Image (spheres, coloured by chain):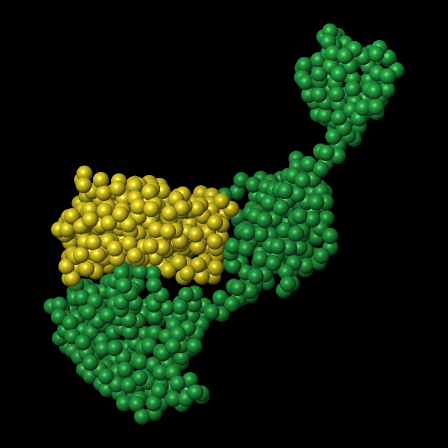
Amino acid sequence: MAGVALPADDRLARELLDGLAEAVVTIDPAGVVTLVNAMAAELLPELTPGVVLAGCRVPALAEAARDGADTFETEHLGRRLRGLRRGLAGERGAWYVRDVTEEHARTDALLTERSRTAFLAQAGSRLGLSLHRDQTLRAAVALPVPYLADVAVVVHRPPPPAEDEPHWIRYATGDAGPITGVAGWRTVESVPGLVEALDGDLTAPSPWLDAELADLAEVLPADFGRPGTVLISPMPSAGGPAGALVLARRPDRAGFDQREIALAREFAGRAGAALAAAELYGEQTHLARVLQNSLLPPELPRLPGMTLAGGYRAAGDSLRIGGDFYDLFPTGDGGLFALGDVCGKGVGAAVLTGRVRQSLQTLRLVEQRPRELMELLNRALLDAPGAAARAQFTTLLLGTLSRQPDGGLLVRMAGGGHPAPLVIRAGGGIDAVRVGGMPVGALTAARFAEVEVRLAPGDLLLAYTDGVTEARGGPTEPAMFGDDRLRQALASGAGLPPAALVDRVLQLVDEWLDGQPHDDIAMLAVAAA
Amino acid sequence: MSPSCRIGPETLAAYLDHLDRADRVGAVALARDLVAGGCSVADVLVDLVAVAQREIGRRWLTGSWSVAQEHAATHVSELVVDALGASVGAPRHGLVVVACVEGEWHALAARIVSEVVRAAGWRVTFLGASVPARHLVSYLHQTGPEAVLLSCVQPNRLVRAARMVEASRAAGVPVLAGGPGFGPEGRWATAIGAAAWGASARDAVRLLAGPLPAGTHTGPPPPPEDDAYVAVLHRRRELVRLALGAVDPPPESVEDVASGIAHLVDALVAAVRVDDDRLLRDFVRWQEEALTARGGRRLLDDVLATLEAALTEYPRVAARLRTARAAVTAG
């Protein structure tokens, strides 16, 4: 068609122009409007032929005209308009203006949805990381800032044994990290909507536009000033309300719109669920820890005339308790020690370990001679309800340490099927002390043996469980750590204090294992002086 | 150092003398006198005990001290740390956890960090030497600390360090790395996902005082640059066996040599993980120094050559081994 002459028909040209979905405005070389089509009259009623474009009452278009710009975009009469300027022959020009209101709204909605999804995805993964309450609370206040608010506060009630008093944790833009404090019931009650949220009332969260929130100041940063908008959402969870999320915006930021309120509410729900899971886990681990603390090897007492050290590595993964143990009780002229290995693994073995240790703790009050004590223990264990059905036994080494006038120690040991302890002489020689005997807790007619060893000053006695020698590893083919390697390790460490020697053996076994799983490992070392 | 605190070369010499004689009473008395004379606990631990520990390491490396002497001296320093740590006041900040990377038994540096951080007002739990990754994770979930301070002295433990950083990040706890195992100026610390690195206990205190945004330092760590990483990691044991067969050491030293080769392979895997030739080159030089002091240097070249031949299908890995070999032959 280009170059073909058009019929000079004014009516046809007008009909064509008015039929366009685009607004068309032509201007003469002086910038005066010469022609507007029907769509232009609807979108830009201010423009009529004769109006100077640079001074017209469509500010964005007037500005574009003044600056010689070729495009503009503006909100006008409730519509979003986008304009493009084209030069025409003879210094004249035309503006083509489109109504992009719907297109714009769709893009906006898409972008909002995208950022909302991204926010929730990040929130989900961060909240899912930790099983610890404090850690979860820190994530819950850090995540909404700055996306949803300028400051986020979670008001929560810590689980027992803490006192039932509301605590808060807060994070504001620019803070290095979350800050915590105790709120007190008075503060909580004076903030409108907070008590309801803490009670888990699912009233629709409503923004407090410029409300009287003087009491909220206590939990806001000192330099925050008066908040613009505050949004309080309950943090519901399966077990009841976990807390309340308070989001505040500065006065210069727009309030929460419906979509943001829904988002805040969803986030508060997820944070509440994460918090409840962490609380449940906390209760379980508290229980486990109390058990664990009663089963872990004790801190060894300091006894005059001797140096003691223990070493322990549990096989299990998370509980760190197992079937190996050691104990030491002070006596009049020294101490009474026990080192044992309960057959089996895991919680079952740990429970029996607890029983053996508690029985010893009591029985040693009436009997301190090792072999007699061993026999008593055997009877006590077999008398326990259901002992026969369990058929669990324990290998054990019991011994008394008595100070001697020459500065040495007399060790009297009774054995119950336990690996022979080793004496590392000050000069470097190593003797295995064969004790013999049968495991305890298995047979009523079990026989136990007893031996005596003298430790001169500088000598060291090392009792260990078979987890040391039976550790399977090695740099190439899996093999046991074995007696020879243990003896070699001890010989090269002759003269070391017990703690350093135990550490050295633990280190060598650990290196030997090279990350392979292992059985429980326990060691007890004692040196004269 | 506090203005009224003087810890000069004579003090260090006197302290080392106590260590040399395994004189626990003398060493503790010397440290206590310094604190009484105006030094802070941090001063004594950082400027005396930690400095002395580096000297102990040097003496062991050059063969002038036996392993047993090293252990005895380290034990004395541990007692000094215990004695000074007991005098620290009540905590004002949150909880941090200090751990040595699994397999790492040089715990003294981490203990010093624990005590200095405690003296700066933090609640500190020291989990000890060689902490298995799963123990760390269960501890993190139980206690929810604000940060993990992870100590790694030898770069061949870096792969295990990476595993522990990954585990901590997955538990939502950021990690601050410390120790020479993370490379010169800690250059490999961020490659495995640590939030930052510190050279000394004082750095640890400084880093803890700054912001540690959990959002950026938790979740999945940065992936390894080189795809060969997983493949080489899985062939670790096989590679050790191959190299051991190639050098065929006398029976009495098989285990020592095998564990030396295992460390070297670990250093290679670590170099692939952080994508830096320097890690392997420095480690090989260090091993060479230790081996030369114990008379057995030729071995290293044979080991590197065998590994290179075994890994030709991974050109970038083989190239790293070639570079390391050149460094040994040139040295």
Instruction: Name the outermost residue toward the bottom.
Output: A445
Instruction: Name the outermost residue toward the right.
Output: A11
Q: Quadrant of residue A463?
A: bottom left
Residue A21 percent across, percent down from the top left: 80, 26
A133 relative position to B274: left or right: right
Picture quarter with the N terminus of chain B: top left
B224 relative position to B105: left or right: right
A258 relative position to B8: left or right: right
Q: Nearer the viewer, residue A392 or B212?
A: A392
Q: Can residue B118 be seen here?
A: no
Q: Residue at x 75, y 8 (%)?
A: A30
Q: Residue at x 36, y 59 (%)?
A: B131
Q: Nearer the viewer, residue B275 or A469?
A: B275
Residue B307 percent across, percent down from the top left: 26, 49
State the hue of chain A: green
Q: Residue at x 66, y 43 (%)?
A: A113
Residue A202 percent across, percent down from the top left: 71, 57
A83 relative position to A380: left or right: right
Q: Quadrant of residue A2?
A: top right
Count of labels in the image = 0
Q: Nearer the viewer, residue B33 or A380?
A: A380
Which chain is rendered yellow in the image?
A: B
Q: Residue at x 32, y 55 (%)?
A: B236
